[in-house]
């Protein structure tokens, strides 16, 4: 097992697609397929199942992904240790962000950082809030960006931005066509409606649960029709007419403008975006530079 094979495996696992991984790594598709095949043959374990046009991790693949991320992070950290004494002309910063932040908020800040430090490679992976916290705790990544807090003595949270959550439905939903009484929704309305929600462990789900708790509405009493693992899947299901949901305003903006989603007269509290790091590990100079730049460019 080589580091290159592990890098290829992680790239395929995160994208669940051999061609996309090959493109991201600037390798031939045959080289990527050969690396995966070599791993499976050497250890007599299937790492992926093919489902339609995509592939999915097997149980063995999921177990290897956890270890591979830790190993590659340690290798990157070794390189970072040597380069951190220089002028930040080379090195790697490993980050992980929850979906909403990674897709809609973080990219412009990383572009600004990249322009200031063109020799620094930024390795960004995506997971829900619970997964980001787990990777920070395990040392797989140095910094995380999340939408919720998970209590841990090892983790340090720092608010860096605010995000507005919105309640939306499809245009043909009863809450939009006058079948319910006009005016803001009541607790009874919320309990009677069907809901499409993000999976447990996501910051979006946590924010919704907290909002309902403030209204004394237990989630177990709500009619959750579907739980989905991405913002895009939730948005598409609601656009197709299945119930209501709560998402970041950034996620819904284009669909609201196109009329595919409609807002509901119900105010959800805004929430914080947090920068997350391990409180018992020293931050690298690269991480410190990114945080310092964000202090200058981010308005609370």
Image: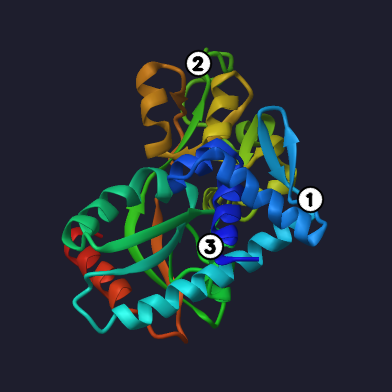
Q: Residue at x 42, y 32 (%)?
A: 252
- Mark 3 sits on what residue? 132
- Mark 2 sits on what residue? 171
Label 3: how many residues lie within 10 Å, few (<14), some (14-19) or many (20+)? many
In terms of depth relative to the viewer, which is nearer, 2 or 184?
2
Task: Look at the image and tell me in which quarter the C terminus lies.
Answer: bottom left
Secondary structure state at the residue bearing disc 1: loop
Task: Look at the image and tell me in which quarter the N terminus lies.
Answer: bottom right
Q: Residue at x 24, y 72 (%)?
A: 289
Secondary structure state at the residue bearing disc 2: loop
Q: Position of residue 37 (x, y in %)?
A: 70, 49
Q: Is residue 136 left or right of residue 47?
A: left
Q: Is residue 46 left or right of residue 273?
A: right
The tag on residue 271 is none
Q: Position of residue 168 (x, y in %)?
A: 49, 29
Q: CA distance from mark 3 to mark 1?
A: 26 Å
Taking the image as drawn, is residue 218 in sight? no
Q: Quadrant of residue 145?
A: bottom left
Precedes in sequence: disc 3 or disc 1: 1
Precedes in sequence: disc 3 or disc 2: 3
Q: Quadrant of residue 277?
A: bottom left
């Amino acid at each position: 097992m080589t580091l290159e094979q592990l890098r290829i495996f992680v790239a395929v696992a995160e994208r669940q697609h051999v061609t996309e991984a090959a493109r991201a790594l600037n390798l031939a598709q045959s080289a990527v397929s050969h690396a995966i095949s070599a791993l499976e043959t050497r250890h007599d374990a299937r790492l992926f199942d093919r489902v339609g046009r995509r592939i999915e991790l097997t149980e063995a693949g999921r177990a290897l992904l956890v270890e591979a991320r830790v190993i590659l992070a340690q290798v990157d950290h070794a390189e970072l240790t040597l380069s951190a004494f220089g002028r930040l002309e080379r090195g790697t910063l490993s980050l992980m962000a929850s979906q909403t932040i990674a897709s809609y908020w973080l990219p412009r800040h990383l572009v600004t950082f990249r322009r200031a430090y063109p020799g620094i490679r930024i390795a960004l992976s995506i997971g829900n809030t619970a997964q980001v916290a787990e990777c920070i705790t395990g040392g797989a990544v140095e910094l995380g960006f999340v939408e919720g807090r998970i209590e841990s003595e090892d983790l340090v949270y720092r608010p860096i931005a605010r995000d507005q959550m919105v309640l939306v439905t499809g245009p043909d939903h009863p809450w939009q066509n006058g079948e319910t009484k006009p005016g803001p929704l009541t607790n009874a309305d919320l309990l009677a409606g069907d809901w499409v929600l993000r999976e447990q462990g996501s910051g979006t789900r946590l924010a919704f649960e907290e909002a309902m708790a403030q209204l004394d509405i237990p989630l177990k009493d709500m009619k959750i029709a579907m739980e989905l693992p991405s913002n895009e899947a939730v948005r598409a299901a609601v656009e197709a007419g299945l119930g209501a949901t709560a998402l970041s305003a950034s996620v819904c903006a284009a669909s609201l403008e196109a009329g595919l989603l409609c807002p509901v007269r119900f105010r959800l509290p805004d929430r914080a975006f947090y920068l997350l790091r391990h409180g018992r590990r020293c931050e690298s100079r690269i991480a410190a530079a990114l945080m310092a730049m964000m202090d200058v460019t981010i308005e609370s």
